[in-house]
Amino acid sequence: MKSSEIIEVNEVKNLCADSNIDFSQLEGNHMIRTDETVTLYHGSKSGICGSIAPISREHCDFGKGFYMGTDRTQPLTLICNYPNARMYTLSVNLSDLNIFNVEVGLDWALLVAYNRGKLEFIKHSTVYNRFASLSKDCDMIIGYIANDRMFVVLDRFFNGDITDMALINSLAALKLGKQYVALTEKACKKIKILDEQVLTGNDRDKLKQESEARRSKGVAMADEICRKYRRDGRFFDEIIKGR
């Protein structure tokens, strides 16, 4: 390991120690190389026009890219309110790509915070710079989905309403699916469309009901966990203070 890499690892270890978090739960974060081909799913509000490209909105979980998930129901619930929605089944060849795999935990939450613009008030700090460069030179990021249930918990964490311990235990309980985000044109060229499905009005109505039921159940579960850990851990501003 290079000296610069050791310094970065030590910074994260110190951050975890300050926050009462076991560093071992973050050690799965690493660059990977694989020849695997995976089947993933993508939901589009109006259908894919032209070539697949990394052109999502700027402030998504892992930045601008083309987002795909391992759980077919997740993208369906995101597009069920749109009459021209399309559901895609995709084949993705991961060979010859620089891939960053980020496991669920504080690292994941702070990377999402950075990409959603929640760390701008500490721009140029050690924490900000680390997460700004974490996926540098990556073609793809693999990480857990901050779905509609998790949005609520993340926002409460970023707004200082709950601690890191409440957040991490909520993450574990909600059992989020994974998302693969193609960040470069190189990664996007590895994606092939296997199937395109048009959602009918009945499909969308059923998905709306399912989405709301799952969201309510998830939020209730997270609320219970947050109450349990309300006195444990540290708050968002305490974690990044002075870093």
Image (cartoon, grey):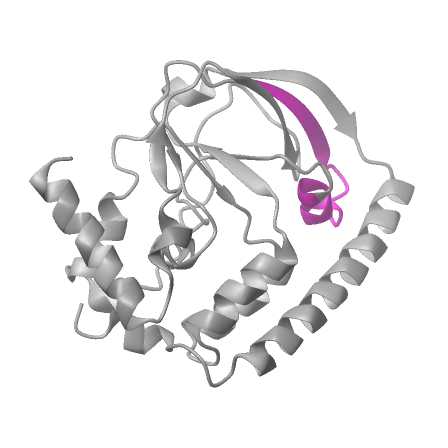
In the image: residue 196, left or right of residue 141: right
Quadrant in the rendering for residue 4: top left
Compared to residue 220, the image places residue 107 above or below, namely above
Residue 122 in picture, x, y percent from top left:
21, 67
Q: Which residues are magenta?
A: 74-92
The residue that appears at 16% across and 62% down in the rendered structure is: 125
Is 203 colored magenta in this rendering?
no
Q: Quadrant of the C terminus?
A: bottom left
Q: Residue furthest bottom?
A: 231
Q: Residue furthest left?
A: 3
Q: Residue furthest right?
A: 202
Quadrant in the rendering for residue 118: bottom left
Compared to residue 92, the image places residue 19 above or below, namely below
Residue 116 in picture, x, y percent from top left:
40, 57
Q: Nearer the viewer, residue 66 or 214?
A: 214
Residue 145 in picture, x, y percent from top left:
55, 48
Q: Quadrant of the N terminus?
A: top left
Q: Nearer the viewer, residue 2 or 76?
A: 2
Compared to residue 187, the image places residue 161 above or below, namely below
- Figure disc tally: 0
Quadrant in the rendering for residue 14: bottom left
Residue 203 in picture, x, y percent from top left:
87, 41
Is 81 colored magenta in this rendering?
yes
In the image: residue 213, left or right of residue 105: right
